[in-house]
Amino acid sequence: MEKGYMIGVDIGGTNIRIGAAREGGMLEAFEKTSSQAILAGEQAVEHLIDFLRNYMHEKLKSQEIEGIVLGLPSTLNAARDHVIQTPNIEGLNDVPLKKLLEEALHIPVLIERDVNLLFCNDADRLSLDPAGINIGVYVGTGIGNAIFIDGLPYAGTDGTAGELGHVYIGRRGKVCGCGNEGCAECYAGGRRLVELREEAYPTDKIGKLFQSHGEDAALIDFVDTVAAMVAMEVNILNPGAIVLGGGVLNMEGFPRERLIEAIHRHTRKPLPEKMLKVFFSEDASENGVRGAIIYARIRNKAKRAVA
Ligand SMILES: [Zn+2]
């Protein structure tokens, strides 16, 4: 029986969010702090260790702690113990993070892609049937993609499964942050909206683009491109459920009905189109932390079942 706290940490480019919960309990001691303050520079891991140690002493009063789960905006290896690369966080490149944290803190540590932890939170909130395949597509600055098989995230041979934002969608002219030309997220991610605003609506606030200009061809095309990307994965995997979320899809006036209609339009008929189950994720600051704690419980249950 697990009696202690599980700590969830959601590391983003802007904020680090952290919280803790006992099994079956509410999220406690939730807080948000600037990523820059902790992760800037080469000492990122040392500072992260200090931050976690302080949190355990000050917020949880050093009560029993079962483990820590960290969600990272990073490329991880398949074994999920090594951070291969983290855009914009220099100190989290090529780091054996799990080992370093476990040695310093003397508690079990799990590291996972942030998007997979977001999906854990959504799957729990929506009570999705974990059997078979379920997917999540989160449209933020880039595209986050979660592929779950029988309730656990699919990592792929090298750890990089679920790079849906980097499929080539037949367009040329834009070079992606990954170095390839024509990746989907160049046309269907938040960065594209920033570009569109600069090109066509320089006086508008980015958050109001869909509300004010949702019927313009460029924004209709944006939504259709998101749909094409989702439908591509649906046609390949035939998932039981599709969860859609991220900051862009939660913008005011974002045309969810149009997106769903376009996903149906691009999906193979009669199946899987006829049976599509599409859900939306609701944006909340705690989602990643909550998802991290849920993920730890799922992993522990799976481990106990094997044992
Ligand atoms: Zn790319």
Image (spheres, helix red, strand yellow):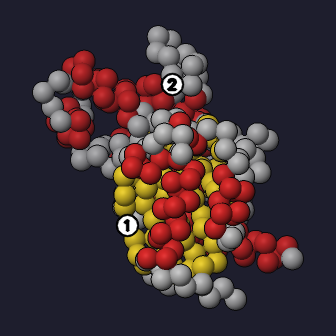
Q: Answer with mark 2 or mark 1, whichever residue precedes in sequence.
A: 1
Alpha carbons under labels 2 and 1: distance apart: 31 Å
User: Which label sits on residue 31?
Assistant: 1
Asked if residue 270 can be seen in this view, the reply is no
Q: Are marks 2 and 1 in contact (CB under 8 Å)?
A: no
User: Which residue is found at the position 67% from the left and 39% from the top?
Assistant: 94
Q: Is residue 25 visible?
A: yes
On residue 152, the disc is none
Quarter holding the N terminus is bottom right
Q: Nearer the viewer, residue 273 or 132?
A: 132
In the displayed orientation, state which residue is furthest to the left: 203
Residue 96 is left or right of residue 173, and the answer is right
Label 2, ligand 1: CB separation under 8 Å: yes
Q: Is residue 116 found left or right of 98 in the rendered image?
A: left
Q: Secondary structure at mark 1?
A: strand
Q: Please, what is the three-letter code of the amino acid marked with disc 1? A: Glu
Q: Is residue 2 above or below residue 162?
A: below
Residue at 43% across / 77% down in the picture? 59
User: In the structure shown, which secondary structural element does the residue marked by tag 2 occupy?
Assistant: loop
What residue is shown at x 29% (from left), y 46% (from top)? 251
Residue 23 x, y percent position in the rendering: 58, 83
Spot occupied by residue 242 in the image (x, y as percentages of width and height): 54, 52
Query: In the picture shown, does residue 24 fall above or below 220?
Result: below
Q: Nearer the viewer, residue 151 or 27?
A: 27
Is 97 situated above or below 23?
above
Q: Mark 2 — residue?
A: 177
Left or right: 40, with 153 as reference point: left
Type of amino acid under label 2: Gly
Closest to the observer, 288 or 105: 105
